[in-house]
């Protein structure tokens, strides 16, 4: 069976995600030969078989919640390969990290630092710390991670300088990450160079710069992929020019995004005031990104058609106009019951969605491994969680 046939098979049981672990494994092995230390940001896709595939490719893990930490630990991954980021680090999460001797805490506030310094006294273990900085940029630009906006991620320069003068735990370096889905090497260079310069004003020499994520993937035909060889060469150059011993990347989208597809079916078709509308079984209840940042995922019809294409507005099943999956050019002969596949949903797909609203089915998840398809979780009705 080929991938299309797997997707059509899956659509018979309901809307589902399908991840190609064989292709992901090759990609991860290729990335792991790099000039930086690579972590996978679990928030992009915490499915155990995805994490297991990345573990086998020697990728380490960035967690930002107790759920993510427990998921990584449940796969037998040692704390020495885990770092903790995130603006919320409740006492229980810090304790769990200390119990499992996670390698590094990324400190995002003075309170996180105080809590860690207090709690660490109860454990015979000293984790490393990275201090997360929030920079101010001159030009206004929207970005889901904040960009120019003041956000809860990290601390301003004054606060970091004051923490640096009083640190009692091993200081490893800095963490700075404010931009997502970057497709230009030049833009990466500008951001990373500026970042390094700011860090050097705080400490002329330090061991690690963690630049977070931000490497982009194309979501439409007009965008070009960011070449890994170019990114890797840029990292080597910056480390060399700025005498930077280690650069860490917490990769999400670039690692898993291209290896996931989502299949759903057409439940209604109509034309309203001249606009062709398709209503789908699954929408932002399964894939919220189009509503969050008004950027649709590439979509295609899962059967051959010789018909001309026309512009359709794709909507999900929720009773809100927010449930809009974008305008797409699709064959005019599309019918109720046809299956559509959305591409590049291997990152920020299912777990970023709003699955409970209106009590529709939760989507299933399946993987392709060694050429065969395995269903990890079938679609589930609302009765599986509704009390
Ligand atoms: C702290 C942190 N690291 C890494 C990532 C992954 O980013 P990306 O998917 O752009 O690689 C995120 C995403 O929000 C993040 O918040």
Image (cartoon, rainbow, N blue to C red):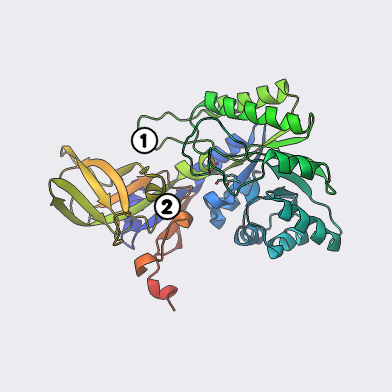
What kind of element bears circle 1?
loop
Within the displayed image, which quadrant is ligand 1 positioned in?
top right
Residue 17 picture quarter: bottom left
Residue 36 picture quarter: top right
* Relative to 278, 18 lies left or right: right
- The foreground one among 303 and 122 is 122
Which mark sits nearer the N-terminus, 2 or 1?
2
Q: Residue at x 71, y 49 (%)?
A: 107
Mark 2 C-beta to ligand 1 under 8 Å: no
Asked whether the viewer can see residue 174, the reply is yes
Residues tagged 2 and 1 counted as in contact (Cβ below 8 A): no
| Residue linked to disc 1 | 220
Q: What is the CA distance from the residue labelled 2 to the residue labelled 1?
A: 20 Å
Q: Which mark is residue 291?
A: none
Residue 223 picture quarter: top left
Point out residue 96 in the picture as x, y percentages from the top left corner.
Answer: 72, 62
Q: Residues within 10 Å of mark 1 (few under 14, many from 20)?
A: few
| Residue linked to disc 2 | 18
Point out residue 155 in the picture as x, y percentages from the top left corner.
Answer: 67, 44
Picture layout, residue 243 above or below residue 67:
above
- The foreground one among 188 and 48 is 188
Q: Count how many numbered circles sit on residues in the image.
A: 2
């Amino acid at each position: 069976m080929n991938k299309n046939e797997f997707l059509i098979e899956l659509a018979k049981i309901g809307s589902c995600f399908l991840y190609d672990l064989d292709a992901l494994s090759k990609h991860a092995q290729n990335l792991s030969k790099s000039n930086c230390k690579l972590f996978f940001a679990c928030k992009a896709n915490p499915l155990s078989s995805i994490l297991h595939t990345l573990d086998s490719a020697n990728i380490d893990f960035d967690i930002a919640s107790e759920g993510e930490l427990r998921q990584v630990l449940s796969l037998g991954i040692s704390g020495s390969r885990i770092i903790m980021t995130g603006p919320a680090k409740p006492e229980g999460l810090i304790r769990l990290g200390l119990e499992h001797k996670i390698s590094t805490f990324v400190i995002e506030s003075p309170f996180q630092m105080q809590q860690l310094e207090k709690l660490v006294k109860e454990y015979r273990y000293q984790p490393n710390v990275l201090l997360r900085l929030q920079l101010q940029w001159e030009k206004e630009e929207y970005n889901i991670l904040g960009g120019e906006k003041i956000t809860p991620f990290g601390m301003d320069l004054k606060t970091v300088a004051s923490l640096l003068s009083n640190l009692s735990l091993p200081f490893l370096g800095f963490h700075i990450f404010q931009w997502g889905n970057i497709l230009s090497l030049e833009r990466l260079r500008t951001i990373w160079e500026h970042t390094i310069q700011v860090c050097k004003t705080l400490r002329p020499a330090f061991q690690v710069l963690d630049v977070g994520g931000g490497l982009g993937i194309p979501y439409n035909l007009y965008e070009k992929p960011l070449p890994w060889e170019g990114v890797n060469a840029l990292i080597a150059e910056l480390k060399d020019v700025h005498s930077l011993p280690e650069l860490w990347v917490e990769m999400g989208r670039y690692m898993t995004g291209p290896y996931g597809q989502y299949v759903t079916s057409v439940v209604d078709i109509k034309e309203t005031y001249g606009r062709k509308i398709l209503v789908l079984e699954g929408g932002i209840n399964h894939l919220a990104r189009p509503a969050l940042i008004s950027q649709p995922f590439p979509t295609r019809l899962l059967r051959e058609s010789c018909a001309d294409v026309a512009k359709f507005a794709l909507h999900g099943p929720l009773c809100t106009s927010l449930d809009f999956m974008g305008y797409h050019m699709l064959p005019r002969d599309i019918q109720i019951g046809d299956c559509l596949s959305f591409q590049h949903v291997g990152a920020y797909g299912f777990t970023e969605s709003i699955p409970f609203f209106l009590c529709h089915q939760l989507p299933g998840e399946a993987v392709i491994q060694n050429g065969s398809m395995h269903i990890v979780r079938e679609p589930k009705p609302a009765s599986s969680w509704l009390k």
